[in-house]
Amino acid sequence: MRLEEIELWRDRGEKTPLIIRGEARIPDERRGTVIICHGFKGFARFAFFPLLAERLAQSGFCAVTFDFSGSGIGRDRENFTNPVAFTHNTYFQELDDLDAVVAEAKVHDWIDDRYGVLGHSRGGGVAILHAARDPAVKALVTWAAIASTNRWAPEVVAEWRQRGFIDIPNARTGQTIPLSIELLHEVEQHGETRLNIAAAASGIRAPWLVLHGDADETVPASEAERLASLSESATLSIIEGGSHTFGAKHPLVEVGPVLEQVISKSVDFFVTHLGM
């Protein structure tokens, strides 16, 4: 297996260029490719993603992990040293990022005419939106995925409108980073159309494994049940005792039985439905 780094610059005229950084784990004999999407306040090297990518590569898949350009994660791939990027991040930007990563993978011949996508939390929602519009996605796995892009209580929205931003705390780093009202405007304008995750779910035809913990403190398991009910190709697996991160903390020092179960189910699913 070899490791290749990814660095894509998306200069769209901003004072601070958008940068997508990541890596591809490429096995000696490739049976398929899986692209992995992190969630809100997440990053490619968070806790379980490197382990998941390693397990996929060991099973013969090229595993591509990356930081969304608006993740806020800097060059060290660990810390939120680019808060401006986080402030102005949006769903459409993340969808564009995912398209860019797929295109880059094709340039390097890491992807042929079929591939798989895995997304966690908000990254699961992005993965669903992407899979619904790209027929080359032949297998989809979501971990604790959101079922809607509109997720804010009325009082939060009211404050957001008044201030033009809301404060987003990060318990891991102790930082508080503002989130621009751009995201709210985007969801209000397109949440029932181009950013409608439920509608996208109903259009998923590829085999889809919906994994969710019954003890998820961030995204209720009812959202997984809703997503799975919308697609005939979906298989729902509720993980007993699973939190939003399936018991994983960063840095990952111990792989608990819940996380091991989720990773094993995911790898086995890709082997069954994506392996050549």
Image (spheres, rainbow, N blue to C red):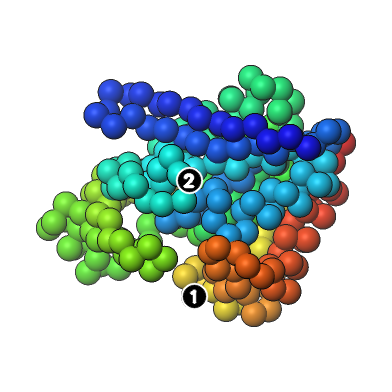
Tell me where residue 130 appears, x and y as whole percent.
56, 39
The structure residue drawn at horizontal position 76% and vertical position 48%, both measured from the top left corner, is 56
Number of the front mark, 1 or 2? 2
Tell me where residue 98 appears, x and y as whole percent.
53, 36
Tell me where residue 274 appears, x and y as whole percent.
80, 42
The structure residue drawn at horizontal position 64% and vertical position 51%, both measured from the top left corner, is 50
User: CA–CA distance between discs 1 and 2?
Assistant: 26 Å
Under mark 2, the amino acid is Arg
Find disc 1 in the rendering and name its residue.
217
Find disc 2 in the rendering and name its residue.
77
The structure residue drawn at horizontal position 71% and vertical position 64%, both measured from the top left corner, is 262
Residue density around tag 2, few if under 14, some if 14–19, many if 20 or more, within 10 Å: some
The structure residue drawn at horizontal position 37% and vertical position 32%, both measured from the top left corner, is 18
Q: Is residue 134 above or below residue 219?
A: above
Instruction: Please report contact status of discs 1 and 2: CB closer than 8 Å, yes or no.
Output: no
Q: Which mark is residue 40?
A: none
In this rendering, position of residue 24 left or right of residue 41: right
